[in-house]
Structure formats: structure tokens, C-alpha cells
């Protein structure tokens, strides 16, 4: 997309977020926008940054290495890793990202914690929850989320922030809300049992309103900002 179109699209996504906050009685500004730049060039990130967007999401380590290095001159970008994590590719993520939304196993959590540079703030992480176990998506089950969360919260160089999910796409608003409600209920249970979570990472281009209705604090939006991608989906 051209420069003008990215700025315009960002503006309209921010308006959708504000409208949903207002409609669903969420405080104005309580939902953060993560701009998902996977599959898009560094120039697209620069254009979004010019409009004040600082948080960007990437899904593929190889692509992120090139892009983050190209953009290393901008020092207030915050990078969020949202893709599948291979255990042998954690070092770059541990040191160059600020957040990981797609933590799905303890082995990876331990490696990220061990590899996180000692001069950096702890890495903020969300546990990815697979609400629909017959799908091919990664993530822990609802049943194991609390215990895995407890173990992650003990790791010294990670800060467990919350939960993330990627539901099956669904056309109508009422059914979009169902998995988001389930994640919010799990979030509340985890907090009632002693985890201090502050983040619900849920909602994408097609369902961010439903996610905000159910309590999302971060929506992850790619297509509605940068246009369609021709990369394989994670
Ligand atoms: C690609 C991706 C997104 C963005 O999806 P859009 O439909 O393009 O908004 C959000 N979250 C994750 C985990 C993704 O992989």
C-alpha cells in the first residue's frame, strides 16, 4: 500500500477501536493497537511509525532479522513476536523483541529466559491458548494454561503478562465473541488463582470489535492496515 493509504488505514483502524471501546463501555484508550507488519517491507513500518504507531508484530524470525536490522536506527519501536517459535531460533527473539505473544511451551519459555540479555528489561510474554483443540493452531489447552503460566511466571528474565489466542475465523459477531469470552474467563480464573495478568491479546482485522467487547487489551491488526499478504499463515 502507498504511504497515504497506510496512514489512512491506520486512522480508520484506530477509529474502529475507539468506536468499540465506546460501544462496549471500555475506557477510551484501554485497547492498544499492535500493527502486524509480517510480509511487509521496512518502508511500510516507517510509514506507520510516522503516524505515531510504535508497536509492530512479526511472525517469522528470518524476515524479522532483516527488517529489524533495517530499522535499528529508530530506537522507540517496540517489537512483538507473534509467530510459531522454533526452539533453536529463540536467541534473536529473546534479545531483539520486547514482547512474545505466542509462547506455547515451557521449553521455549526457559530458553527465552536464559537467553534474554541481562541489560534488557524482562521479556513480556503472553501464553498462547488453543481454545479449539482440533485445529492446527499452536497453544496450551485451557486445562493446562494456569499451571504452565505459574511456571513461566517463575522464570527470572520473563514477565508473564497475559493470554493470547487465534480463534477460527467466523462471520458473525455473536459467534466471534464465543472464543474471546472463553479466553477472558480463563484470564479471570488465572488472576483469581494468583497470576497477576494484565493483558488479553485477542482480535485481528476481521474480529477486533468482538474481541474488544470481551475485554481485549491488545488487538493485532495486519491486513486492515497494510493490505493483504501473500505469505503462508502461521
Ligand atoms: C497475521 C497475524 C495477525 C494479523 O491478522 P490480520 O487478519 O491480517 O489482521 C494477528 N495475529 C497473528 C498471530 C497473526 O499471525
Image (cartoon, rainbow, N blue to C red):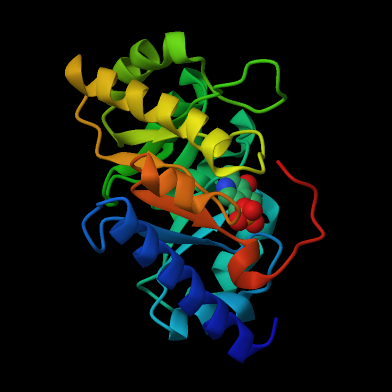
Estimate the x, y position of residue 155 in percent, counting from the top left.
Answer: 30, 25
Decide if residue 126 is on the left or right side of residue 61: left
Residue pictured at 28% horizontal, 43% vertical: 122
Is residue 98 shown above or below 168?
below
Q: Work out whether residue 33 or residue 114 is closer to the camera in this orientation and state it.
A: 33
Expressed as whole percent of the image width and height from the top left, the position of residue 70 reads 59, 74
- Counting labels gives 0
Q: Is residue 22 left or right of residue 226?
A: left
With respect to residue 145, does 3 lie above or below? below
Q: Nearer the viewer, residue 64 or 173?
A: 173
* Quadrant of res 154: top left
Residue 168 in picture, x, y percent from top left: 65, 34
Which quarter of the rendering shows the C terminus? top right
Residue 210 in view: yes
Q: Is residue 73 visible?
A: no
Residue situated in front as seen by the camera: 201 or 90? 201
Query: Residue 201, position in %: x, y?
Result: 42, 43
Quarter containing the N terminus: bottom right
Q: Quadrant of residue 86?
A: top right
User: Is residue 78 toward the left or the right of residue 229 in the image?
Assistant: left
Q: Quadrant of residue 116?
A: top left
At horizontal 35% and vertical 66% (from top left) the residue drawn is 18
Q: Nearer the viewer, residue 212 or 77?
A: 212
* Placement of 25 over or under 43, stated as above or below: above
Q: Residue at x 33, y 34 (%)?
A: 162
For the point 60% across and 29% down, the residue is 87
Amino acid at each position: 500500500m502507498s504511504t497515504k493509504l497506510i496512514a489512512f488505514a491506520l486512522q480508520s483502524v484506530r477509529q474502529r477501536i475507539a468506536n468499540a471501546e465506546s460501544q462496549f463501555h471500555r475506557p477510551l484508550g484501554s485497547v492498544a493497537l499492535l500493527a502486524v507488519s509480517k510480509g511487509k517491507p521496512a518502508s511500510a513500518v516507517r510509514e506507520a511509525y510516522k503516524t505515531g504507531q510504535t508497536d509492530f508484530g512479526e511472525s517469522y524470525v528470518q524476515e524479522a532479522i532483516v527488517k529489524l536490522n533495517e530499522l535499528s536506527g529508530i530506537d522507540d519501536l517496540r517489537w512483538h513476536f507473534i509467530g510459531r517459535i522454533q526452539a533453536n531460533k529463540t536467541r534473536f527473539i529473546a534479545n531483539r523483541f520486547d514482547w512474545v505473544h505466542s509462547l506455547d511451551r515451557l521449553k521455549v519459555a526457559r530458553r527465552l529466559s536464559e537467553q534474554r540479555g541481562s541489560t534488557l528489561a524482562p521479556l513480556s510474554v503472553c501464553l498462547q491458548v488453543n481454545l479449539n483443540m482440533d485445529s492446527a493452531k499452536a497453544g496450551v489447552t485451557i486445562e493446562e494454561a494456569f499451571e504452565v503460566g505459574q511456571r513461566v511466571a517463575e522464570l527470572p528474565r520473563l514477565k508473564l503478562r497475559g493470554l493470547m489466542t487465534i480463534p477460527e475465523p467466523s462471520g458473525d459477531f455473536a459467534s466471534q465473541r464465543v472464543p474471546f469470552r472463553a479466553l477472558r474467563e480463563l484470564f479471570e480464573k488465572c488472576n483469581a488463582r494468583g497470576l497477576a495478568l494484565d493483558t488479553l491479546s485477542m482480535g485481528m482485522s476481521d474480529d477486533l470489535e468482538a474481541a474488544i467487547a470481551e475485554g481485549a487489551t491488545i488487538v493485532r491488526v495486519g491486513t486492515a492496515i497494510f493490505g493483504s499478504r501473500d505469505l503462508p499463515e502461521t
